[in-house]
Amino acid sequence: MVAVAGSLISQLRRGVLPYCVLALLAEEERYGFDLVKALGEEMVTSEGTIYPLLSRLRRDGLVETSWQESPSGPPRRYYSLTAAGRSSLAAFEDEWSRFGAAVDHFIQGRRT
Amino acid sequence: MSYDPESEIKQYLESLSSAAHDLPRARRRELVSEIEQHIRQALAESPCDDQGEMIALLAHVGDPVEIAAAASDQAEDGRTPLPATVAFLRRPRRVIIALAALVVVALAIATAGWVQTYQPLAFAPAYGLPAGSVNTIGDSDHGALVG
């Protein structure tokens, strides 16, 4: 079971990461590097893998991008949520609160 | 060996580009350019004074093979993957081999056809001979076919 834990976490992470990105972008628009820092090491183990994910979210119409000048260095590509991204996030929040509660129910039920 | 951050970055981006060779060219270029910007922003935030720090920074960015694999995954479960035929045609060497094989097969068929045409006339099919010539051997079956 201990051996499985690493791959289990990476599977869980892969499943929820897109929605954590959408949730962060719902607060404010961000550029890639900033997003990686905000997600932290718990969510992003290999920083570069966030870009293929952002690219897919953009192709799926959940986020949109705009280039903006940066106070230091080259222009930055900012990501923000689209209307479709907002409704996708809302649907996930709904699912997650039910699913998370169900998992908690079993785990906490065992503890007491 | 002197430390050159630019050559470290260049080397890293080259290995990313070659690891991502399966991606469509535009997607691959976009990925490489985004990773390059990420590296430059990381460097602007915490400059690397020696090779060890640069290697650590690139390790944080991730294994190029892993990043390329994430890119192919996202390409596939997002929309339609590249059709097999298109993926095939993107490899010039395979196309040349396939065309060569096609030529060999065509030649084999042509040769077989040529040999059959010049078999003894009893076996000759009606095609390949002028319609009238078949009747001259007095073969009623062939005559019926042609008539």
Image (cartoon, coloured by chain):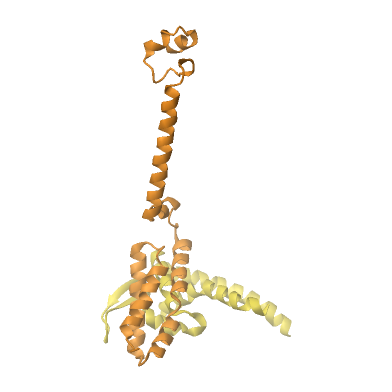
Q: In the image, is A85 to the left or to the right of A2? A: left
The answer to which image quadrant residue A57 occupies is bottom left
Please give the letter of the chain rendered in orange: B
Residue B96: percent from left, percent from top: 37, 49
Which quarter of the image is occupied by the N terminus of chain B?
bottom left
* Nearer-the-camera pick, A70 or B19: B19
Q: Would you place residue A84 above or below residue B110 in this image?
A: below
The number of numbered badges drawn on the structure is 0
The answer to which image quadrant residue B60 occupies is bottom left
* Nearer-the-camera pick, B68 or A100: B68
Residue A1: percent from left, percent from top: 68, 77
Answer whether residue B118 is visible to the viewer in this image.
Answer: yes
Q: In the image, is A63 to the left or to the right of A88? A: left
Q: Would you place residue A1 above or below residue B110 in this image?
A: below
The answer to which image quadrant residue A105 occupies is bottom right
Q: Residue at x 47, y 79 (%)?
A: A46
Q: In the image, is B78 to the left or to the right of B37? A: right
Q: Residue at x 45, y 79 (%)?
A: B62
Answer whether residue A82 is visible to the viewer in this image.
Answer: no
Q: Residue at x 51, y 69 (%)?
A: A91
Which quarter of the image is occupied by the C terminus of chain B?
top left
Residue A56: percent from left, percent from top: 42, 67
Please give the letter of the chain rendered in yellow: A
